[in-house]
């Protein structure tokens, strides 16, 4: 019996090899064991491989990039002071802006996650602004629909960007030489959306912050592309209410930029046979800048409105707000962006003071305007 009993009930120090719960484990012990095992899937998940979402374009590579921005805006508020304070019109105004840029970049030297020398050919540059206005003032009404387009002398030209390690900036030059040097002043090298990238490898679900000031290279790729209105013969509204650079966001990003921009790696996706890292983007930013000198420069040589003997922009302060969400697809093997698709809402505010001479009298006019609406940004590289 003792031997049979020993077979039926093995000593506690021997491992239990049968099925079911060992007889010597009570409910409390089982609960403790379950608690210890719970974190295991989480620990295993933390060992998931990291992905390198970085700029690693090979030297000698050539990429054609296209960028497009569209905005539909409506006038929300307008006030006038000074000499025009008693002539406040009842006005409705809408504006549509379309901005397109296409370039081809040839990477001659790449080092440290950025180009050190590249040649950029400006394949196509242009913008279109459509404005519709209804105005009543002093018992008179006026409707005006205008279309205006802008172009750049840079179109069809090539520019080299060479990194100067001592000055820590790019030296820009026409390649071949011969273009107007002034066209180079506002150009920026980064049209690779590098501002959106993390500093190191990232795992799925990981987030990082983006410096709002660096978004100028995302929202206004290429910088100031020297866009100028085409000679269209369109009638001026005579009140200084034209878009005047609203389609060129590069001018609106000075040092006073605040807000928050975040990115999140959301896994991989195959697109057109290419393995792309998916990065979700969220922007909520505000930029303020003094554009007085830029507008004065634009107005040089322009004739004042009919009936005005002379006119000068005393001050022009603008404010741009953007709330947007989107998705960046990054070609991991190629080391460059595949596409960007963003959309959201924006607000544009301007405060300007104008001094003018009419009928031999000097007068000053103050004007504030606020537009709001929707906007979208798309980009592709191949």
Image (tube, rainbow, N blue to C red):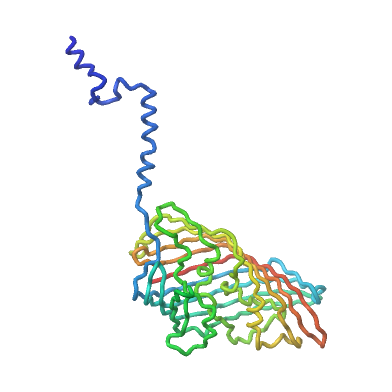
Which residue is more in the foreground, 40 or 279? 40
| Percent x, y of residue 185 | 54, 80
| Percent x, y of residue 351 | 70, 71
Which residue is more in the foreground, 293 or 281? 293
Name above or below for residue 201 compared with residue 105: above
Check the picture and name the quadrant holding the C terminus: bottom left
Residue in view at x 37 percent, y 77 percent:
108
Residue in view at x 73 percent, y 69 percent:
78
User: Looking at the image, can residue 156 be seen?
Assistant: no
Name above or below for residue 264 compared with residue 150: above
User: Looking at the image, can residue 362 be seen?
Assistant: yes
| Percent x, y of residue 365 | 77, 76
Q: Locate residue 292 relative to residue 104 in the image: left or right.
A: right
Figure quadrant of residue 312: bottom right
Q: Locate residue 349 relative to residue 217 in the image: left or right.
A: right
| Percent x, y of residue 118 | 41, 77
The furthest residue to the front: 166
The furthest residue to the top: 1
Residue in view at x 50 percent, y 63 percent:
342
Check the picture and name the quadrant holding the N terminus: top left
Figure quadrant of residue 6: top left
Residue in view at x 61 percent, y 63 percent:
286
């Amino acid at each position: 019996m003792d031997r049979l009993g020993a077979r039926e009930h093995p000593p506690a120090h021997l491992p239990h090899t049968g099925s079911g719960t060992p007889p010597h484990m009570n409910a409390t012990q089982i609960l403790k064991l379950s608690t210890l095992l719970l974190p295991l899937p989480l620990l295993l998940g933390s060992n998931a491989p990291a992905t390198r979402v970085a700029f690693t374009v090979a030297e000698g590579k050539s990429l054609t990039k296209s960028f497009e921005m569209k905005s539909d805006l409506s006038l929300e508020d307008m006030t006038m002071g000074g000499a025009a304070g008693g002539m406040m019109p009842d006005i409705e105004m809408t504006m549509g802006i379309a901005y397109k840029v296409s370039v081809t970049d040839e990477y001659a030297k790449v080092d440290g996650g950025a180009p050190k020398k590249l040649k950029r050919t400006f394949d196509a540059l242009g913008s279109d602004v459509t404005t519709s206005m209804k105005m009543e003032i002093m018992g008179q009404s006026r409707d005006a629909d205008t279309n205006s387009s802008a172009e750049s002398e840079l179109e069809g030209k090539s520019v080299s960007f060479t990194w100067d390690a001592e000055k820590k900036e790019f030296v820009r030059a026409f390649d071949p030489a011969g273009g107007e040097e002034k066209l180079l002043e506002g150009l920026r090298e980064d049209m690779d959306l590098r501002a959106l990238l993390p500093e190191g490898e990232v795992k799925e679900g990981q987030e990082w912050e983006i410096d709002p000031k660096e978004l100028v290279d995302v929202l206004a790729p290429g910088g100031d592309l020297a866009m100028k209105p085409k000679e269209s013969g369109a009638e001026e509204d005579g009140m200084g209410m034209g878009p005047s650079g609203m389609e060129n966001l590069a001018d609106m990003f000075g040092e006073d930029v605040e807000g928050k921009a975040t990115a999140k790696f959301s896994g991989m996706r195959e697109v057109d046979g290419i393995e792309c890292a998916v990065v979700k983007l969220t922007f909520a930013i505000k930029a303020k800048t003094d554009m007085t000198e830029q507008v004065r420069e634009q107005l040089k040589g322009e004739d004042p409105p009919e009936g005005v003997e002379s006119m000068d922009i005393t001050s022009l302060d603008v404010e741009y707000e953007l709330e947007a969400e989107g998705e960046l697809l990054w070609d991991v093997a190629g080391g460059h962006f595949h596409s960007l698709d963003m959309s959201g809402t924006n607000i544009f505010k301007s405060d300007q003071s104008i001094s003018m001479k009419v009928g031999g009298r000097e007068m000053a006019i103050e004007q504030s305007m606020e537009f709001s609406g929707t906007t979208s940004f798309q980009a592709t590289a191949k």
